Amino acid sequence: MVFTRYVEVGRVALVNFGPDSGKIATIVDVVDQNKCLIDGPTTGVARQIIPYKRLALTDIKVEVGRGAKAAALKKAWTTAGAQEKWDGSSWAKKLSSKKTRKGLSDFQRFKVMVARKQKSQAVKKEMKKLKA
Amino acid sequence: MTVAGPMKQYQVVGRKAPTADFPNPEAYRMIIFAPNQTIAKSKFWYSMHQFRKMKKTTGEILDVNEIVEKTPAQVKTFGIWLRYDSRSGTHNMYREFRDVRLTGAVTQLYDEMAGRHRTRPRSIQIIRTGIVATADVKRANTLQFVGKNTKFPLPHRVASAKRGTKALSSRTFVTNRPTTMFR
């Protein structure tokens, strides 16, 4: 299997553990085999050293130099359209739908269940028509 | 020094207590790495009594200041020269660590000396520290990460244990195979 996502300067990664969990940030510098420096001036992630264990690399890359400052990163972030790319990815959509599902009340979950039943019924009906 | 943990950098100034014969003794300044001020003062006296004829009971501390990193937003390579006592002798050593803070590099040093050489904090003496320019990096491991095109994948990732749950790899029975390969 060929790798497509690398730890490198400019790689956008999702933080999946700790206080910034769920936010995305950019790798600005590689510290060593265990950790890197990330910054997310537009995503609310403070500049910090973070271990790779807390990161999930994404397909998105931003054109920045090593150790780029927040202002330069902000500019590159908008030029690359990183936020739009992330929001448009199925990964981000799944995460946000998971979040809304988690916030639902019992009755709202019931409504989802009913809606799903109705949807599958409608699909089955159409399928039967097509088969006939 | 008995404990390591996150280190801080202190500037300790001390001198012999003034007497009638010597009303104005010379003051000495020392940069010391220690987890807190109390240990910094203790390390000051430990080093000082080896160089000059003075000790805690006949001296006084004039000032203890914490030194904070000037550029905590920038990753640097720190070179550390040290002396340590192993089980069989005393050795000099030079090591490189990458971090945003010198104190972070020193903390890494104490942890690594414990791990690789079973060295206790009390038997480590830091001789000199400095920022190493990219061209002057000596150690192969550091060289890997200072290059212009540092780039590597994260192959075979095993999710570590979270609070309350064991890692998938260390559970006795699981109903699904762990995924370790990501792009």
Image (tube, coloured by chain):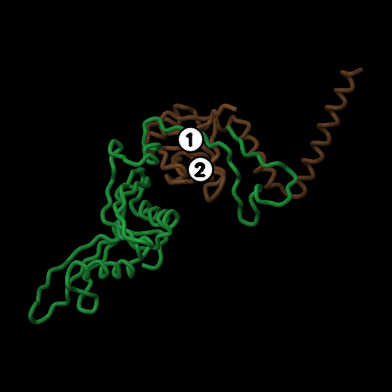
Q: In which quarter of the image is the N terminus of chain A?
A: top right
Labelled disc at residue A52: 2
**Quadrant of the rendered image containing residue B43:** bottom left
B97 vs B7: above or below: above
The residue drawn where x is 37% and y is 47% is B99
Q: What color is chain A drawn in?
A: brown
The residue drawn where x is 68% and y is 46% is A102
- Letter of the green chain: B
Q: In which quarter of the image is the C terminus of chain A?
A: top right
- Pinpoint residue B151: horizontal percent, then vertical percent: 45, 32
Q: Which chain carries label 2?
A: A
B100 relative position to A55: left or right: left
* Residue A96 seen from this side: no
Q: Is mark 2 on a helix, strand or loop?
A: helix
Q: Sort mark 1 into few (<14), some (14-19) or many (20+) by Cα contacts within 10 Å.
A: many
**Quadrant of the rendered image containing residue B33:** bottom left
- Pinpoint residue A53: horizontal percent, then vertical percent: 53, 45
Labelled disc at residue A7: 1
What amino acid is found at the position of numbered circle 1 in the picture?
Answer: Val
- Pinpoint residue B52: horizontal percent, then vertical percent: 17, 69
A51 vs A75: above or below: below
* Residue A62 seen from this side: yes
Q: Are marks 1 and 2 on the same chain?
A: yes
**Does the residue at mark 1 contact the one at mark 2 (Cβ under 8 Å)?**
yes
What amino acid is found at the position of numbered circle 2 in the picture?
Answer: Tyr
Q: Sort mark 2 into few (<14), some (14-19) or many (20+) by Cα contacts within 10 Å.
A: some
